[in-house]
Image: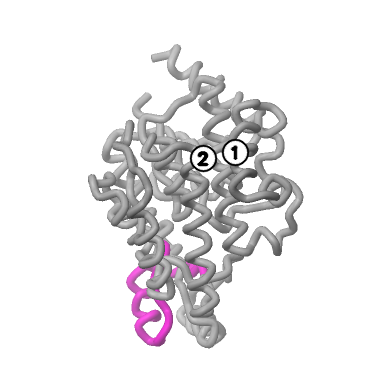
Amino acid sequence: MGRIAFVFSGQGAQRPGMASELYREYASVRRLFDEAEAIMPGITKLCFEGTPDELRETRNTQPAMYLADMASAIALREEGVVADGVAGFSLGEIPALSYAGVMSEVEGFYVVCRRASAMAKAALSSPACMIAVMKLDDESVIKLCCCFSSAYPANYNTSGQLVVSCGVGEKDDFIRAVTSAGGRAIPLAVSGGFHSPFMDNAAEEFGSFLKGVKIEKARLPVYSNVTAQLYSSDIRKTLARQINSPVLWRQLIERMVDDSYDTFIEAGVGGTLVKLIARICPGVATYTAETPDEVRMVADKLSAVASEV
C-alpha cells in the first residue's frame, strides 16, 4: 500500500443530519461542536436539523460542512487512521489545512465563517449560479463560455465534467447552448458563482482578513486547488486566491497519484469526491467515512491491507 490521502468534501454535498451520528459516538467530535457553538450559536442544530434551503445558504453551508468534514477526520483519527497528505474541494481546503496543523480545528472554523460571510456578500452583489456540464470535453465547455459575457469555467472535476459559474441572466441560454452542443447541464445547489470573477470582492476581503490570522507550517503535505501542486509558503495568498480561481480537482488528484497516493478517504459528506477520484484514476482505493460504521470499516480494511504487506 502506498500513501493515504484524506480528501475533504466541499459545498454542495451538505444534507440535513450530517455528522449527527459521529457527534453521538465520539466525545472529541462533540468538543469541536461545543467550541463552534461559542463562535456561531445554533450551528449544531443547523447541521442536524436544518432544512435543505437553510443549508444551501452560503453563510450556513460552509461552517456546517467544515464541522462535518472535521468530524469525519477526528473519528478516523480516533480509530487509528491517519493521512499522509490531504486535499479539499473548495471549502474542504480549510479543514484540510486545519488537519495539517496550519491552524487549529477551532481557528479553522472561525476562518471558514469569515470566508462564508465574504462569499455570501459577493453572491448578493453579483447574482450567479453554478452549472455542471457533462458529456463535453473541457475545451468545448471553455469555448461555450467564451460565447457568453458572464460564464466561466470554475471546477475541473473529471474528464467530461466541468462546472461553470454563470450569471443568472444568462443561465437559461447557457443551458440551451450546452444541450445544443450535445452536453447535459445540471444546476447545482449553491447560492453563488464561486471560483470565478463573481467572487473577486470576496477574495479581496478574505485576503485582508487572513493577514491577521496566525498561520503555522503544515505538518504534512497539503495540495492546492489553485495550482494542483503542494501549498507553497505563502498560504494566506493562495487561500485567498482559491475563492475566485478555478478548482483544478482532476489535475490535483493526478498529481497526488503521481506522488504515490493510492488510497483516498473522503472526510465529510456524500462520497462525491471519491466517485470523481475513481473516474480520474481507476484502480486507486477509495472509501467514505461519513458514519461511525463507515469509519470503523475503513480502519478494519486498512489494517487488513497493512497486515498483508
The location of residue 264, given as percent across then percent down, is 44, 36
Decide: is 273 above or below 295: below
Q: Indicate whether residue 30 is drawn in magenta.
A: no
Is 176 or 165 nearer to us in this picture? 165
Residue drawn at x 42%, y 68% as measured from the top left? 202
Q: Indicate whether residue 140 is drawn in magenta.
A: yes
Q: Mark 2 to mark 1: distance in Å?
A: 7 Å
For residue 57, which quarter of the picture?
bottom right
Decide: is 62 above or below 17: below
Decide: is 143 above or below 194: below
The answer, for residue 184, to whether it is visible in the render is: no
The answer, for residue 100, to whether it is visible in the render is: yes
Quarter of the rendering occupied by the N terminus: top left
In the picture of the structure, the residue carrying the numbered disc 1 is 35
Residue 106: image tag? 2
Residue drawn at x 49%, y 36% as measured from the top left? 265
Q: Secondary structure at mark 2?
A: helix
19 with respect to 137 (left or right) = right
The location of residue 47, given as percent across then percent down, is 68, 48
The answer to whether marks 2 and 1 mark residues whose Cβ atoms lie closer than 8 Å is yes
Point out the tag, 2 or 1, that comes first from the N-terminus.
1
Q: What is the magenta range?
A: 131-155
Is 102 or 22 nearer to us in this picture? 102
